[in-house]
Amino acid sequence: MIVPDHNKISVTAKLVAYYRGFSDIPFAKDVSRLIEASQAFEKLAVDSGIAAEQILEFAPIFEIRYKSIVTLIRNSGIRQVLELASGFSLRGLAMARDEGYSYVESDLDDLTSEKTQIIHELGIDYPLANGVHHFASVNALDFDQLRAATSSFDRNKPLVVVNEGLIQYFSVAERQTLARNVRRLLGEFAGGIWITPDFTVKSDIERVSVHRERLRQAVMGMTDRKLYESAFDTQEQMDAFFAELGFAATLHHQLDLTPHLASIQNVVRWPYIQPRLRERLKIWELRSV
């Protein structure tokens, strides 16, 4: 089993945290400051050779992705959630504290330890008075670790599994393992759904701007992982993959799920960018059948 090098992959988690810091996502600004995410952003600007203001145009993408996932979780009506490779997102903490969810945020050991320290530095009363929230050290490719992370959940109720920004670092074999693990885990509950924006068709990633390609190359250099190796050849191949694993797939457009965006205040070209993003930014709701 291949385990991504946390010390390299975590750089991208800090980049995402930096971008989220321009939004009104709960805790995002404080997390970005505490982990010194600006340093990761500055390294990306240097490595890619792209002006910082041009890279900042990607900030709404990460706000849209985060908020579209929250919307789908809420719409599902399911109240227990496992998030895989949660990075420096504190979505689970926010949804447990403010909305009473039972939520487990999981990631590899070092990052999970760092997030525990962040909660301490934020001065949040923990454990929470409302909702249930836990961190768990989990390699998403290890089913036993996934099962252990959900030990506090009620197996007689459905489960939501969430991941964002994970599968594009995986090989085809790792993508297969993850999907089988999620389907098997949902089978231990009273059904449930898998929410993720991470699936890609190769034609979608081939039609990118020069800036986006340079960013992709810089990220691959920082992580020492190929990006989008697990992309599907065609949409038909993706659909067959879902069906084979026992998922009924519903495709959504992330922008349709995010009526309010704070970070676009920093993007002068937003009216030009927005129409292109609607078709590009997709998210799947995969229901176990």
Image (spheres, grey):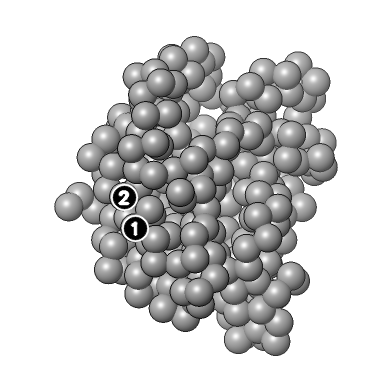
What amino acid type should be assigned to the residue bearing mark 1? Arg
Whole-percent x and y of residue 64? 68, 40
Packing grade of label 2 (10 A; few <14, some 14-19, many >=20) is some
Tell me if residue 75 comes above or below residue 185 in the rendering.
above
* Side of 216 relative to 158 (left or right): left
The residue positioned 52% from the left and 53% from the top of the image is 193
Whole-percent x and y of residue 179? 35, 47
Tell me if residue 253 comes above or below residue 62 in the rendering.
above
Which residue in the protein does label 2 denote? 180
* Side of 81 relative to 261 (left or right): left
Q: How many marks?
A: 2
Q: In which quarter of the image is residue 147?
A: bottom left
Which residue in the protein does label 1 denote? 184
Whole-percent x and y of residue 135? 48, 73
Label 1: state its secondary structure. Answer: helix
Q: Marks 1 and 2: CB-CB under 8 Å?
A: yes
Q: Of all residues shown, which one is farthest toward the left? A: 1
Q: Of all residues shown, which one is farthest toward the front? A: 289
* Side of 100 relative to 90 (left or right): right
The residue positioned 42% from the left and 29% from the top of the image is 239
Tell me if residue 103 comes above or below residue 240 in the rendering.
below
